[in-house]
Amino acid sequence: MSKQTIGFVGTGVMGKSMAKHLQQAGHPIHIYTRTKQKATDLMNNGAFWHDSVASLANASDVIITMVGYPKDVEEVYFGDKGIIENAQPGTYVIDMTTSKPTLAEEIAKHASEKGIHALDAPVSGGDIGARDATLSIMVGGAKADYDKMLPIFELMGQTIYLHGEAGSGQHTKMCNQITNALNMIGVCEAIIYAKKAGLDPIKMIDTVKSGAAGSWALANLGPRILKEDYAPGFYVKHFIKDMTIALETAKELEIHLPGLELALQLYEELSEMGEGDSGTQALMKYFERA
């Protein structure tokens, strides 16, 4: 049985590795990037590059998008040159960008009118999870569509759940980012405390990460902080976007999230320091300055 042809829009820090896993599993891969050079590695392994979203959409059985901001999602899905107008009926479209739950609902509605199956499936795990195919994938949409796409999700991730109808994946990702934002504050403050108390911060992390305070951020980003490695597994600027969406959605749900408000304030100040393109672990630079 032939493999589905997969179109991939957005081959950045995480998307590139995700597309590579699909390619290695034998799926023909079609790529759209604004800059052709960004797709060079995938093209060298047989991927087809397209100069427009419309061209890619027309050539693909499954289309995965992993772009930056909600406005980018709107741009690639809507309009005469977008995915919905140019994908064939029966195509599956999966937005893996962290975006607005309401936008996921809108995509699903318009896709359904065209006979297209839509899922929102944001991910967590950063560059390491994308590289190792151990991402957590949070899916919203129809169960039949989820079941059909599960083998594709399993090529990219390890923890994969359907959380409900369209938008549910994005709501789950907001929960993830709320937890992540407050956790990064804790990781940075714990390292500062350990150093001031004369502890070996490496031993501290090794001890704490297996206890009740253990977390992915502590285990994976804590060591990067100690090495002053602030390369992006996930950009500060994108984290600010996610926290802003979460707070806007919380307002719609009539709930107050003071911890997240504080985290957003700290990250906005970090961005003003010129760290928008750094990884989220660069929050340590804010504390070091303070």
Image: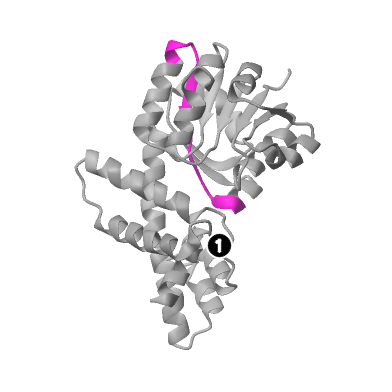
Q: Which residue is mark 1?
A: 220
228 vs 27: above or below = below
* Placement of the C terminus among the 4 image quadrants: bottom left
Q: Amino acid at mark 1?
A: Asn
* Placement of the N terminus among the 4 image quadrants: top right
Instruction: Name the side, left or right, on which 227 lies relative to 282.
Output: right
Residue 248 picture location, percent across and down: 29, 43
Q: How is the image coloured?
A: one colour
Instruction: Name the side, left or right, on which 25 lies relative to 287.
Output: right
What residue lies at 59% left-to-right and 61% top-to-bottom?
231
SS of the residue under disc 1? helix
The part of the chain drawn in magenta is: 112-128
| Residue 283 picture quarter | bottom left
Q: Is residue 212 visible?
A: no
Instruction: Name the side, left or right, on which 98 lies relative to 62.
Output: left
Residue 279 lies within the magenta run: no
Assess disc 1: are there few (<14), some (14-19) or many (≥20) residues with their C-alpha within 10 Å of its C-alpha: some
What residue lies at 45% left-to-right and 29% top-to-bottom?
74
Q: How many marks?
A: 1
Residue 117 lies within the magenta run: yes
Instruction: Name the side, left or right, on which 4 lies relative to 92.
Output: right
Q: Is residue 186 visible?
A: yes
Residue 95 picture location, percent across and down: 50, 31
The extreme bottom residue here reads 198
What residue lies at 21% left-to-right and 50% top-to-bottom?
256
Q: Nearer the viewer, residue 53 or 65?
A: 53
Residue 90 picture location, percent across and down: 55, 13
What residue lies at 67% left-to-right and 31% top-to-bottom?
31
Q: Nearer the viewer, residue 279 or 270?
A: 270
Residue 219 picture location, percent across and down: 53, 64
